Image (cartoon, grey):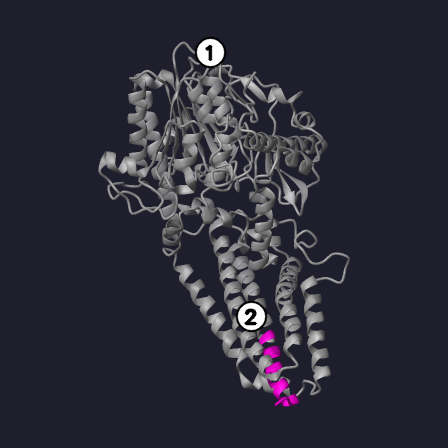
């Protein structure tokens, strides 16, 4: 049987399904934008025009995605129109496929919202770092948040609502009465729908299709990402990831950055020739000096600057060491105006130890390469015993396999420490910091009694959510309202975790300063990234807080390099400065890449901080990309922590530094890739 009625019924059902699909896709995007704006509205300072543009542009992006899917649905339908039974089966299959897509889109929408809750922005390249993390730990952490269950309910309700609406007979009956009867007219109707969907997928009648680079709500990246939807944010995150992946060759690195050769690249990065990148340590010591480097989980400058004894005691036992900085003859040096190298822990580790803006290296095709320029290898070659001590698990990010290849004699994780002290923790991310610091103290004491000095790189974990503190710990007062936040149990828990970590760092320094090792040990501490999910840094004015972590250096005054350490806390810098500084303080004769700026040698000027993820810090403000163009956000006033809300075209001297910093990043990548393609290449060879 092949009657017009036989074809019109499934055709009407398919069109009704497509309309319901478009409605549910638009609803997903609208829900995320409304909730995200309401959560961040007190900071965004949106005008009515900007708000309207956000929702209108968001609707266009939603229709772009829906149109892309439906254009394929209508085009494939044309192939089956001549066979009514096959076409009816196709209509049912279309309902099933589109239901799966609705489920996926709402899942991504809720993931988008989860990113806003936790990271302060929609889905970006960081989503792929989560795949490299401990999936079980991430799942357990997520399930502790009640909002996740509401999001799962929303996904189920949306998918069920789509199926229910698409199967309502009144919708398809109304359409059936209005669809043409003749097969040729029905084919023309499907072709028209395909063309209209294609136009929606293009998103624009102008020269360029609707895309991230062609449309913007404002100069706030948060809003521009929010205008897109979960699928598009994931698409662009994957695009950014592929562009940031380890290049195939050093020639590709040069070509992509527009340099003819590495000599031209080195000059652009501020070096007369490529060989000038490698320097010899300026340290002069009378006896071996230990180096302990603490990478503290979630150590935000923002939280540290809110410390108030008696009300918000977040610096706890570390406060006395921080306060001692800047005093005449003090070994303590405190620099709160530093930027982290990445917005995740592993990117910061790889930038610190490999000086690599390309990440993750440990899980790339270079995972078995032994890099000559790896910092632990430089320490080991200088006669140090080297150890990576982590409060977390050794299998995280392929660490236990990768880092011993880079010069660590041992990688010791939570299992080693738990066995040593007979303890365990329900925290999926790691053991309480007190046991970590105790273990490092034992390692340091043993090395001091032995033959070789110690280089220890230490990763803390307690301040990672979920924050689970030891039952015996008695926290001091904390107050989220100091930061303009709502006083609730979650924020208090975050501040208590931060306080606990600071108490353990302070306790370690207390022991060190009271010991004979005080004059032969250098300690460096910094944050891996800001404490995520604590405050909303989406406002342009919070562009400094978004990436700011402190740097602390304990350097005995007897060390020659200590006299060069800046006494002012106003100095700016990045992670790239810190291990070169330690080498210049403690390790005479070591050769290493000077891609950051050592604080322990004279400098005629301070460059802007080199940051690997699109923001550069200067003494006068922050520069970052806004819609693929650099904008400079000056500090609101001298000594201020906030920058101005409106970016300006970078002044010539800032623009020159931005270009130099970009070339520096490219040079870092070139050095990494060059060692991958030629294992015999040794940049450190004189």
- What is the magenta segment's predominant secondary structure? helix
Q: Residue at x 45, y 24 (%)?
A: 377
- Label 2 sits on a secondary structure element that is helix
Taking the magenta stretch, the answer to whether it contains residue 486 is: no
The disc placed on residue 514 is none
Residue 150 image-quadrant placement = bottom left
Element class at badge 1: loop
Q: Residue at x 43, y 64 (%)?
A: 152
Q: In terms of depth relative to the viewer, which is nearer, 189 or 471?
A: 189
Query: Could you say where residue 485 lies in the image, as x and y percent from the top left?
Result: 45, 49
- Which region of the structure is painted magenta? 1-18
Q: Left of 324 or right of it: where is 186?
A: right
Q: Can residue 112 be seen? A: yes
Residue 508 on image: x %, y %: 33, 28
Residue for badge 2:
24
**Left or right of residue 310, residue 579 in this image:** right
Query: Which quadrant would the N terminus be assigned to in this image?
Result: bottom right
Relative to 681, say whether 163 is above or below: below
Question: How many other residues sit within 10 Å of disc 2, few (<14), some (14-19) or many (≥20)?
Answer: many
Q: Write down the residue under mark 1.
A: 284
């Amino acid at each position: 049987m092949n009657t017009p009625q036989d074809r019109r019924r499934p055709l009407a059902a398919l069109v009704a399904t497509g309309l319901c699909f478009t409605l549910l896709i638009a609803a997903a995007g609208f829900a995320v934008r409304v909730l995200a704006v309401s959560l961040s509205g007190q900071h965004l300072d949106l005008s009515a025009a900007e708000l309207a543009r956000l929702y209108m542009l968001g609707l266009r992006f939603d229709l772009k995605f829906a149109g892309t899917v439906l254009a394929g649905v209508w085009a494939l339908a044309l192939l089956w129109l001549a066979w009514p039974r096959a076409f009816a089966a196709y209509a049912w299959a279309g309902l099933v496929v589109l239901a799966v897509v609705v489920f996926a889109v709402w899942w991504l929408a809720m993931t988008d919202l989860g990113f806003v809750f936790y990271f302060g922005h929609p889905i970006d390249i960081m989503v792929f770092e989560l795949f490299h993390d401990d999936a079980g730990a991430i799942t357990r952490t997520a399930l502790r948040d009640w909002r996740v269950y509401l999001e799962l309910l929303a996904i189920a309700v949306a998918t069920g609502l789509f199926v229910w609406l698409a199967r309502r007979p009144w919708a398809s009956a109304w359409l059936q009465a209005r669809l043409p009867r003749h097969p040729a007219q029905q084919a023309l109707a499907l072709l028209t729908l395909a063309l209209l969907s294609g136009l929606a997928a293009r998103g624009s009648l102008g020269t360029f299709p609707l895309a991230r680079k062609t449309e913007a709500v404002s100069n706030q990246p948060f809003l521009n990402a929010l205008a897109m939807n979960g699928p598009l944010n994931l698409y662009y995150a994957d695009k950014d990831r592929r562009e940031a992946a380890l290049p195939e060759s050093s020639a590709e690195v040069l070509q992509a950055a527009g340099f003819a050769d590495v000599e031209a690249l080195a000059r652009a990065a501020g070096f007369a020739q490529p060989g000038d990148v490698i320097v010899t340590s300026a340290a002069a010591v009378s006896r071996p000096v230990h180096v302990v480097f603490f990478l503290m989980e979630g150590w935000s400058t923002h939280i540290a600057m809110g410390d108030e004894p008696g009300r918000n005691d977040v610096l706890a036992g570390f406060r006395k060491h921080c306060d001692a900085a800047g005093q005449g003859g003090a070994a303590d040096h405190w620099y709160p105006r530093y930027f982290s190298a990445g917005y995740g822990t592993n990117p910061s580790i790889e930038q610190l130890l490999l000086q690599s803006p390309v990440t993750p290296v440990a899980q790339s095709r270079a995972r078995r390469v032994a890099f000559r320029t790896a910092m632990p290898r430089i320490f080991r070659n200088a006669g140090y015993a080297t150890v990576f001590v982590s409060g977390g698990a050794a299998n995280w990010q392929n660490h236990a396999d990768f880092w011993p290849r880079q010069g660590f004699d041992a990688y010791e994780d939570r299992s080693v420490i738990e066995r040593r002290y007979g303890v365990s923790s329900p925290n999926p991310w790691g053991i309480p910091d007190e046991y970590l610091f105790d273990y490092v103290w034992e390692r340091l004491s043993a090395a001091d009694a032995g033959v070789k000095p110690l280089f220890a790189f230490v990763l803390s974990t307690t301040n990672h959510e979920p924050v689970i503190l030891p039952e015996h710990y008695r926290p001091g007062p904390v107050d989220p309202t100091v930061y303009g936040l709502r006083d609730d149990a979650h924020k208090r828990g975050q501040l208590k975790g931060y306080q606990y970590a600071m108490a353990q760092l302070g306790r370690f320094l207390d022991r060190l300063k009271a010991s004979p090792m005080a004059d032969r040990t250098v300690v460096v501490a910094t944050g891996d990234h800001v404490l995520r999910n604590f405050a909303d840094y989406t406002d342009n004015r919070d562009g400094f807080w978004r990436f700011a972590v402190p740097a602390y250096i304990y350097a005995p005054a007897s060390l020659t390099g200590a006299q060069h350490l800046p006494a002012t806390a106003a100095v700016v810098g990045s992670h790239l400065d810190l291990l070169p500084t330690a080498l210049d303080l403690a390790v005479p004769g070591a050769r290493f890449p000077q891609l950051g700026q050592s604080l322990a040698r004279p400098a005629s000027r301070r460059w802007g901080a080199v940051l690997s993820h699109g923001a550069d810090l200067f003494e006068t403000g922050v520069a970052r990309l806004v819609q693929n163009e650099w904008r400079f956000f000056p500090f609101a006033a001298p000594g201020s922590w906030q920058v101005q809300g409106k970016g300006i075209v970078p002044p010539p001297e800032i623009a020159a530094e931005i270009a130099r910093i970009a070339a520096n990043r490219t040079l870092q990548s070139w050095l990494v890739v060059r060692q991958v393609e030629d294992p015999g290449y040794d940049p450190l060879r004189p």
